[in-house]
Image: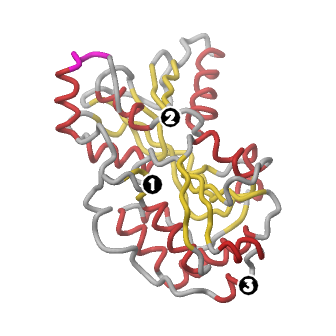
Amino acid sequence: MRSRYALPAIALAAALSLTGCVNNSTTPAASGSDTPGSTAVDAAAVALLPADIKKNGKLIIGIDPAYAPNEFKDDAGNPVGWDVELADAMAAKLGLKTDYQASSFDKIIPSITGGTYDIGVSSFTDNVEREKAVDFVNYFTAGVQWAQPIGKTVDPANACGLTVSVQATTYEETDELPAKSKECTDAGKAAITILKFDKQDDATTAVATGRADAMSADSPITLYAISKLKDKIEPAGKSFEDAPYGIAVKKGSDLTKALQAALQSMVDDGSYTKILQKWGVENGAIDKITINAASKG
């Protein structure tokens, strides 16, 4: 997170170094034991793999590791987080290795459709518009959660005239906030100023330093940010608009069914739940792994 607003540069650097929000270095949760649960190969899931993936022996995964605690970088620059641990365990079920390719969020889906990546694991909200480009293997449910500076009162349902920070190309930037802003202007009220950043870190800093009145992000991300900056930001209301997360896969690929089977095997043997519990995000767990949940309602 980098900001040139509100505090002099030296004071800002000192403040953020105390909060741990300058970079996503390894957290206690990330630096513990290996991924919990079973990693035994699931033969039924392996049988569903496309021949080229099986021969290659790995999944090439597009990821934007700037969305803690879902996916971020440890001190060595390696991707970590509960999304990463789920993907690693899923690949193990398929007898595959994982090869993470860091990317900006907005380039992942085009890189899947273009054949550069096999899949995308980066907290994708499955929606009908994205399903036009890729298929989704749904594995989690997340809501939208706002945060505000300590002591400020922000109502996400009545945010006309406020400045709200977000990570660019996320659901919050492309869908949620534009719709809320239109409701404001349709009612003759001031629009919401959408302050977008390439990295979630920067969006969080904007709230912590007063540049934004609030921020909007998926509930695991916001709650994690609050835990790191509890002396600067707090929840603004409760989470809302629960929606499925999905692993993005090339449209019509046989790989989709293999991933679904591997993740369902993890749900059934308990390894899925153990990973979510390790990171404190088990409230978003689901019992059945689905495909394209947004369009199937």
Please tell me how crowded label 1 is: few (under 14), some (14-19), or many (20+) other residues with Cα within 10 Å: many
Q: On the picture, is 268 further left or further right than 4? A: right
Q: What is the magenta segment's predominant secondary structure?
A: loop
On residue 70, the disc is 1
Q: Position of residue 122 (x, y in %)?
A: 55, 52
Q: Earlier in the sequence, mark 2 or mark 3?
A: 3
Which is nearer the eye, 5 or 269?
Answer: 5
Q: On the picture, is 261 further left or further right than 223? A: right
Q: Quadrant of residue 203?
A: top left
Q: Residue at x 56, y 36 (%)?
A: 172
Q: Earlier in the sequence, mark 1 or mark 3?
A: 3
Q: Residue at x 72, y 44 (%)?
A: 110
Q: Position of residue 85 (x, y in %)?
A: 45, 67
Q: Residue at x 51, y 18 (%)?
A: 193
In what element is the residue under mark 3? loop
Amino acid on which disc 2 is placed? Gln
Cα gap from disc 2 to disc 3, whole angstroms: 38 Å
On residue 167, the disc is 2
Rendered-image quadrant of the N terminus: top left
Amino acid on which disc 1 is placed? Asn
Cα gap from disc 1 to disc 2, whole angstroms: 14 Å
Which is nearer the eye, 60 or 200?
Answer: 60
Cα gap from disc 1 to disc 3, whole angstroms: 29 Å
Amino acid on which disc 3 is placed? Ala
Instruction: Relative to 41, say whether 191 is above or below.
Output: above
On residue 47, the disc is 3
Please tell me how crowded label 3 is: few (under 14), some (14-19), or many (20+) other residues with Cα within 10 Å: few
In what element is the residue under mark 1? loop
Which is nearer the eye, 85 or 74?
Answer: 74
Q: Position of residue 80 (x, y in %)?
A: 41, 58
